[in-house]
Image: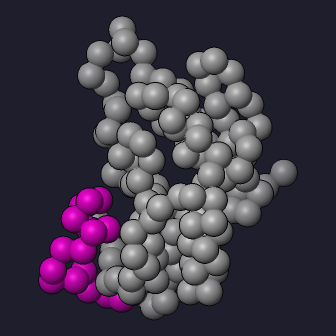
Amino acid sequence: MPASVHISLNVSDLSKSVEFYRGFFGEPRKLKADYAKFVGADPEIHLAIRPTLPSSGPGPLGALSHLGIRVETTAQVREWRDTLRARGIVSEEEVREDCCYAVQDKFWLSDPDGNRWEVYAVIQDTDEKPEAATACCAASGC
């Protein structure tokens, strides 16, 4: 069995987050009163979401920089964006960005808790970090 990525997010409203991720990844593989898990094949991702417990206080909620799905081509970036738009998921404008030592075509979207996602294709690796901060580098500190 090949390796896969698992991401677990704390969310403030499970219902709203399930609706967002249902539009982003399709139907959840598991859906409980306090947990949802989405498993995708392309890209292979295992995403678990669960509400932040009141007793946990101000914990890790929002501590994440951003999440990304890397695809091979700009055409695939556009295909993802068109598919999400058809499902009612709003994204930011697709841009060619010099980010984290690479020129990338991408778009951004945010879930109901403000977790930032990018869908991107690397066009060319670079040796220099851009002089001006971009959305990616400003958010992640890369």
Say whether residue 102 is left or right of residue 85: left
Q: Nearer the viewer, residue 37 or 110?
A: 110
Dividing the image into 4 quarters, which one contains the C terminus?
Answer: bottom left
Say whether residue 57 is left or right of residue 51: left
Q: Residue at x 22, y 83 (%)?
A: 130
Image coords of residue 73 (percent x, y): 61, 85
Viewer can see residue 71: no
Spot the residue most to the left.
131
Image coords of residue 102 (percent x, y): 39, 83
Q: Residue at x 27, y 69 (%)?
A: 135
Measured along the vertical axis of the image, is residue 8 above or below residue 33?
Answer: below
Q: Main secondary structure of the magenta part?
A: loop
Image coords of residue 131 (percent x, y): 15, 83
Q: Nearer the viewer, residue 82 or 7?
A: 82
- What segment carries the magenta color? 126-141
Q: Residue at x 44, y 72 (%)?
A: 107
Is 71 inside the magenta-drawn segment?
no
